[in-house]
Image: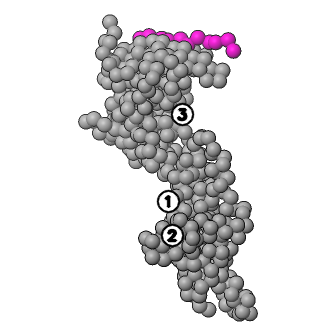
Amino acid sequence: MELGPIVLSFVVALVATLLAFVVGVPLAALLARRFPGRMVVDALVTAPMVLPPTVLGYYVLVSLGRDSPIGQAWQAVTGSTIVFTFTGLVVAAFVGALPFVVRAARAAIEDVDERLVQAARTLGATRSRAFYSVTLPLARRGIGAGVSLGFAKALGDFGVTLMISGNISGRTKTGALAIFDAVLAGDGATANGLALVMTASAVVALVFANRLVERRAR
Amino acid sequence: MMDAAAALVVDIAYRRGDLALEVAFAAGPGFTALVGPSGVGKSTTLALIAGLLRPSRGVIRCGDQVFFDGQRSVPPEQRRVGLVFQSLALFPHLDVLGNVAYGARGAVTPAEWLARCEVGRLARRRPATLSGGEAQRVALARALAMEPRVLLLDEPFSALDADLRHGLRETVRRLVGEAGIPTVLVTHDAADAAALATQTIRLPDRPR
């Protein structure tokens, strides 16, 4: 069994999850506050959980493809495209992971007792210091659980990845895509091996997420 | 009689939902008791003075610093108003010393503030492990360590039995005396008001 696709899946999932964390936590903090249009932003962020991967992949292709302004700008700066590259894989995994991070982080942030934040303010903390020194540490388990779920999701993406990164052996063939190929080629041994590794990874990530949530509840 | 330079002056109205609050008083160094039936807006008044809520109109100032004047509202972190919440609101992720150090300023160390509140031995404990009386003293130390211009105490003795209550009352009296700052004490208990306060403000019950 070739390990390249599995390694690629892990690298992509790690980078995508890191990005989802960096983008998702501020977004969750924003959504935890009341502002006009909150429901719409929330629905847009959550939509990737329920939309068909082909729809998502199509949107990403249209907005980041070779003919799109963003795709062209990216190509002008980096010399390569977003689609059909490692970057595209990361984008696909990021889109899948983001809603998990945002939903869990938002719930965890909303769970933090508002009086603790108020106490921090009366003790001289600005709004942002109170967030970093009180809200974030107290929400960390819930955020960690969301990040674990996001990682599991990013690891296993198939549809969006196929739409925007093709299935180029050695470059954009992730674990999930390699299983697809192995099954088509009638290579049951490879399919079994890859499926086992992917399943084990996802289960480990989910157990980790559950442990974080349970310790938070205690 | 009252030292105008250090006095807290409150003259505000606040309306939200079925709470319509109007409160006006001036408080010099020492205790001002804020009493009245529950739901009448005592804790709300403290939140307004601390800057956690914004009055509908009126003035709040402390000495020559204006906290609120109808247009401008100084954010809570710039008011230096120490507020001891009824729930205490100790930070559960920090130990006792970390709580006191959070807003500490001035020459007196957090450890020294804990000692003054007679809980120096608890420095490395987590808030969740403290008894009610201990937590109350830690919350007091945390508020005092920021060297507040005004101190607000929301039912500081209500959760304690008679012995603890008396001990804490004496600690609070001594420390507020040393700090020489206006201190507003919300209480249900006439005995607390009588023991500590030089003036009592009664918030009227309002017909609903």
Residue B207: x, y in percent?
67, 11
Q: Are marks 2 and 1 on the same chain?
A: yes
Determine the residue positioned at 58% across, 54% down.
A105
In the shown orientation, is residue B96 left or right of residue A112? left
Write down the residue under mark 1: A22
Farthest residue, direction top: B1
Can you tell which of label 1 and label 3 is closer to the viewer? 1
Residue A182: x, y in percent?
69, 89
Farthest residue, direction left: B107
Q: Amino acid at mark 2?
A: Gln
Quarter of the image where one finds residue A5: bottom right
Say whether marks 2 and 1 touch (CB < 8 Å). no
Q: Amino acid at mark 3?
A: Ser
Between A204 and B171, the one lying in front of the other is A204
Numbered mark located on residue B87 in the image? 3
- Badge 3 crowding class, 10 Å Cα cut-off, few under 14, some 14 to 19, many 20 or more, is some
Write down the residue under mark 2: A72
- Badge 2 crowding class, 10 Å Cα cut-off, few under 14, some 14 to 19, many 20 or more, is some
Quarter of the image where one finds residue B112: top left
- Using the rendered image of the protein, determine whether residue A133 is visible from the camera's viewpoint: yes
- Residue numbers of the magenta segment: B198-208
